[in-house]
Amino acid sequence: MNTTRLTFALAATLIAAPVFAESPAVNFDQAVDVSALLKDAKAAAKKDKTVVQSDYYPGGRRTVSDCVSVSFGANDPASSPSFDLRSTEYVEECYNTGDPRHGGGRQCYERVGYTYHERASVTIRDRQALLPWERDTFRVCLDGPWLDIRALETAYDYRLISGGSRDGNYLLAPGKKIAQRPDPVGVLGELDETMKFTLTDRWAAYYAGQQIEIKYTLKKDVPNWFDPTIAEGAWNPVVAASYSVDLSKNKFESGKKYYVEYSIRRLGGKVSTEAWTKTLETNKTAHAAPSLALN
């Protein structure tokens, strides 16, 4: 193939257009008219595919892509191990079986056309610090001869330094900081037998001076049936090492177990986004009268 492509998108935003053999080299250190490059590149790709399909594969063709996700944690090396990508192309061949008036017609079948192979890796140059719960996650895909890298979620706005165009050794450099979602398990709760709901904030020191919003639902555990809601609420305390709410004033049945569903979000948007975390559950416990709990 005489056409190669590179697409690099960060946080659903395209920062580098596909690169073709016919396209001029792009200097990533200067301002780039991304829309113009992308338009020209797509036009060239469309033209190339049309010629190949009409001349050699009149029935059409499709490719099955191969992708690998690469993730960097706060304490991980700045370079990933190398990995192999293989993409298979399937070609549809069609032929006529005779006169349609006598049972004939167009028959098609699919066969393997070509298997593409690339070896890839991802390296971050001048790597900046990540918060303990943050990760930089990228996805590298080979689709036919097209090799590309995309950011799934990153703590910085990364730009491409080199890689692609038949070179799978991607080198990236960080730009401005991007707030990520809060740690989904950074605040964990438990329910004791007195029906006191307590949460522990693992990352309180990073959010000092901000507020946290906590919403909760107290439920009765009913095996093999829907769990009814007993009480629900929300509050916005200042960030601290722990938070608690007394749920003992609700009505409880002797011998029945209860638990709390809860979710949090960090307010202020300075350290992380204000997105709600996934709903978690506390342990299940039976209510005990104050005197029994004391004993």
Image: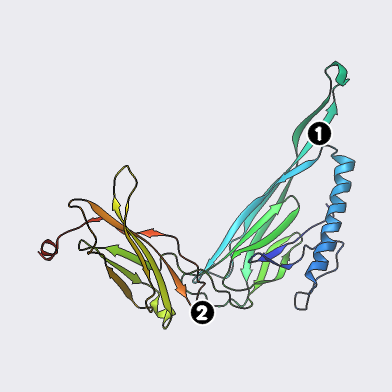
Q: Looking at the image, which residue is at 85% across and 43% down?
A: 53
In the displayed structure, does residue 6 sit left or right of residue 289? right
Going by the numbered disc 2, the residue's amino acid type is: Lys
One can see residue 147 in this view: yes
Q: Which residue in the protein does label 2 denote?
A: 270
Q: Residue at x 44, y 64 (%)?
A: 184
Residue 70 at x, y = what percent? 58, 61
Decide which of tag 2 and tag 1 comes sooner along the chain: 1
Q: Does the CB distance between marks 2 and 1 fall below 8 Å?
A: no
**Type of colouring:** rainbow
Give whichever of 187, 61 is nearer the camera: 187
Query: Does the image show residue 284?
Result: no
Residue of label 1: 93
Relative to 141, is 162 above or below?
A: below
Which residue lies most toward the bottom here?
209
What SS does tag 2 mark? loop
Secondary element type, mark 1: strand
Closer to the eye: label 2 or 1: 2
Q: Does residue 221 lie above or below 39 as drawn?
A: above
Q: Which mark is residue 172?
A: none
Give coordinates of residue 74: x percent, y percent: 50, 71
Q: What residue is at 83 percent from the left and 55 percent from the top?
A: 45
Amino acid type, residue under disc 1 in the picture: Glu
- The quadrant where residue 229 appears: bottom left
Residue 239 drawn at (x, y percent):
38, 78
How would you rate the neighbour count of disc 1 (Cα within 10 Å): few for under 14, some for 14-19, many for 20 or more? Answer: some
Q: Residue at x 66, y 59 (%)?
A: 120
Q: Residues within 10 Å of mark 2 (few under 14, many from 20)?
A: few
The residues tagged by marks 2 and 1 sit, at their Cα atoms, a distance apart of: 57 Å
Tell me where residue 289 sits by quadrant.
Answer: bottom left
